Amino acid sequence: MNFSIGNYFRSTFSATRNWEPLGWVFAGMNLIFLVFAVGLAIFLLVESIPIVRLEGFEFWWGEDWWVGETYGALPMIWGSFIVTGLAVILVLPIALSGALFTSEYLSPPFRRRVKGVMELLAGVPGIIYGLLGVSLLTTGIKDAFNLLDGNTLFTAGCLLAIMILPTVLTLSEDALHSVPSEFREAAEGLGLTKLQTAWRVVLPQSLSGIAGAMLLGIGRAMGETIAVMLVIGSLDRVSGFNLFVSGQTIPSKLGREAAEALGSGEHWSALMGLGLTLFLMVAVLTIFGNIFKHWSNR
């Protein structure tokens, strides 16, 4: 087979000439999205350069954050991982159980009603959840665990779990419901019960969709600002694996200090460094999610 760069570009150009006008509109929108994404990454990188020059790698490994003196991002990075990880651990079994029950056991009319409620809850603004967390969750956790203060990492993790549960549940249910009915009929024809069919046939076929749902939920959890800021206590310290102490996440830190540092200086650059770190964390998470999706599809 003869192949050359010229032939490749000629075939590509001839294909694009056949595009409908609407196709060019979609291509332009996609280009705008890519430009904004790359521009955001470049902006965060450029704004972070001063703090990286000043602190070096100690910016990411340092534990002390004193405005005007030193800036260490480790407490915020660790807090983000702990709170998000706790939210995922709490959400995953509940979301999967609810999605399986809704998809496989509910009648179509009742399923649509449940889906409507879940989608409504998924669209509730974060500040509403934050206010409910301040008034109910912090007090409940304080009394349940006999704590001096209910503003803890555990409280923030529970609140994030409540916030992302509707999103993960409804998207996981969509993935389960999209599995062709032929798989269910074949499994039941082999003598499997409804539960065995759901667990051994439907669930493996929808793993890529469930992974996408979890990825979207984790992305929301990692980027939530106001709700977490209201219940986490906001102390810059590495707590280890002790969940019942106050802490800090990257978004809550940005939410508390961005307004007073707006403009220029080391403080602003340090906050932009936190923003760049969060951007890279979400990007790496997305890459691994896509790898898992391709692997599960294979």
Image (cartoon, rainbow, N blue to C red):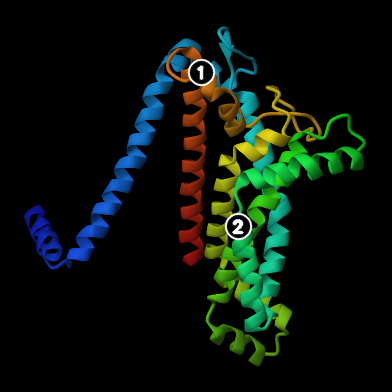
Query: Of callouts 1 and 2, which one flags the residue occurring earlier in the amino acid sequence?
Result: 2
Kind of residue sitting beneath label 2: Ala
**Would you say residue 122 is visible in this rendering?**
yes
Q: Position of residue 51 (x, y in %)?
A: 47, 16
Amino acid type for the residue under numbered disc 1: Ala
What distance separates the C-alpha of mark 1 from that of mark 2?
A: 32 Å
- Asked if residue 148 lies left or right of residue 118, the reply is right
Q: Residue farthest to the bottom?
A: 189
Question: Could you tell me if residue 200 is visible in this image?
Answer: no
Give the residue drawn at x 29%, y 42%.
35
Residue 289 percent across, percent down from the top left: 51, 52
Asked where in the image residue 18 lies, by quadrant, the reply is bottom left
Q: Residue at x 63, y 43 (%)?
A: 127
Instruction: Pick whichever, 147 or 59, lies toward us.
Output: 147
* Residue drawn 78% across the image and 42% down it: 135
Pick whichever, 272 or 8, lies toward us. 272
Q: Which residue corresponds to the image point at 53% horizontal and 24% vertical from the top-left?
A: 258
Give residue 103's quadrant in the image.
bottom right
Q: Residues within 10 Å of mark 2 (few under 14, many from 20)?
A: some
Q: Secondary structure at mark 1?
A: helix
Give the residue pinned by disc 1: 261
Check disc 2 and report its element: helix, strand or loop.
helix
Residue 82 versus residue 5 in the image, above or below:
above
Nearest the camera: 283 or 224?
A: 224
Q: Are marks 1 and 2 in contact (CB under 8 Å)?
A: no
- Asked if 55 appears above or below 126 in the picture, the reply is above
Query: Neighbour class for label 1 at 10 Å: few (<14), some, many (≥20)?
Result: some
x, y percentage for residue 37?
36, 41
Toward the viewer: 52 or 297?
A: 52
Q: Is residue 118 left or right of residue 147?
A: left
Q: Circle 2 sits on which residue?
A: 122
